Amino acid sequence: MAVALGVFAFFVLGGFSLLRSAVVPLLVGTVIAREGQIEETVVAQAVIIRHERVLRSPVTGTVTLTLPEGSRARAEAVVANLSDTEERQQAEQRVAQLEADLEAYDEAHAEEEQALLAELERTRAEGLSLASRLRSACVAADPVQAGRTSLDLAAAWRREADASGRLEEIRKDRAAIVEALDTARLALAQSLFPVLAPEAGLVSYCLDGLEETLTPASVGRYATKDLLSPGRQGSATVDQARVEAGDPIAKVISDREAFVATVVKNSEADRLAQVREVSLRFPAFTGRREARATLFHVGQRERNGYCVVTYRTGELLDGMVSVRQVEVTVVVEVHSGTILPRRALVHRGGQDGVFVLDVSVCRFRPVTVLGGNDKEVVVEGLEPRTEVISTPWLVQEGQRIGDADRPSDVAQSMEARGDVWRAALKAGA
């Protein structure tokens, strides 16, 4: 009992104050205010809504893809070809065989054809010369020369006729092969059913069955549960896949605009509704990840605590082509100024402020909070590089934090009061 009374006397006589003075300065933290920028953001799950035209197979058959995923197609471009596998294989084999036959025929008759052309040129030149000599013999009334020349001219005509006939035969046989090849190629072409892009846009073979449901015209009709509930099983059309007539095989996406429907908390929706222009950032995308967007529609605040806020963007990023649901960071605003930890803020009399060190003395400095995030804020009314108390709950206006409160000084103060402590213990004994 006596010891307890002694301890009580120690605290009454200033022991608690001394202990606080010794410990608190060791716990007080400071930070140097810096100049910079802070983004005010909202992270949400989002659904991409696009202008999409689904392309379906005209027949049952095998699909051959002609364009890469995400590539740009002009209007009427062939996106894919459909064919019956067996029929197409037969047509391809027929074309290949006739092409080989034509090449072999040309190779086998090339030299003969050149020789016949040369023979025709010689015999025609010889015929002209003999015809001139025959005219001269007739004018000279030389029957002997005229007879010989006539025989030579007839022989030249026969050689020309033989060469011409053989050349015509070669060309006729070649023309028959070419005609058969043209027919085979036409049959091959007719065995293909092209699927054309109805308009210019980006081609995607990834389909989820929501292309004709989630459309720009439907923006604002859906609640949060409709957007985030498990959707239909997605599928991707692969080259040489077997499809049925009417099956969707591709889609063409207009790149003039896209809509991003975000699911956010009601409190976040209230903030987003105040800002018309934002940036949308997609961390999961490759390549370009950010696009400027405009507030398009703010849905009803729902009982589940969430709301659908939809943005319109004229920038169709590559990552938007093949995905439907994705995480997005909405950059609401960028604040520039002096940056502090949020924990350094103090509220006094309805005024935001901070404690700064003024020659080792804590002084309250009013500031205006421009914005920030969970950890940091941007303020006006405070110069960068100002030393600010980051643990304001440990200090008060006018308190000295510095050399006067060094642990060694406190220890000396406690030693000076040692007589009181000892006297209290003695009294207790």
Image (tube, rainbow, N blue to C red):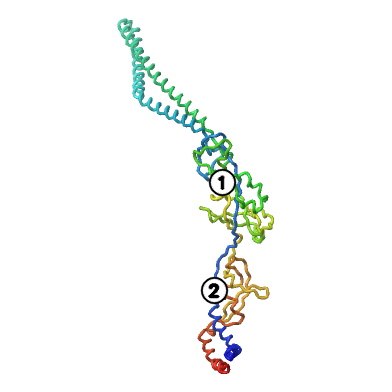
> Mark 2: which amino acid?
Val
Residue 40 location (% of width, % of height): 60, 62
Closer to the N terminus: mark 2 or mark 1? 2
**Residue position for label 2:** 31
Q: Decide: few, some or many residues near mark 1? Use Cα within 10 Å; few <14, some 14-19, many ≥20.
A: few
Q: Is residue 179 left or right of residue 307?
A: left
Residue 52 location (% of width, % of height): 60, 44
Q: Is residue 364 left or right of residue 123?
A: right
Name the foreground residue: 141 vs 400: 400
Residue at figure coordinates x 58%, y 58% from the top left: 329
Q: Is residue 303 left or right of residue 422?
A: right
Name the foreground residue: 328 vs 296: 328
Circle 2 — which element? strand
Q: Where is 25 relative to 254, above or below?
A: below
Circle 1 — which element? loop
> Mark 1: which amino acid?
Gly
Q: Which mark is residue 234?
A: 1
Name the foreground residue: 359 vs 49: 49
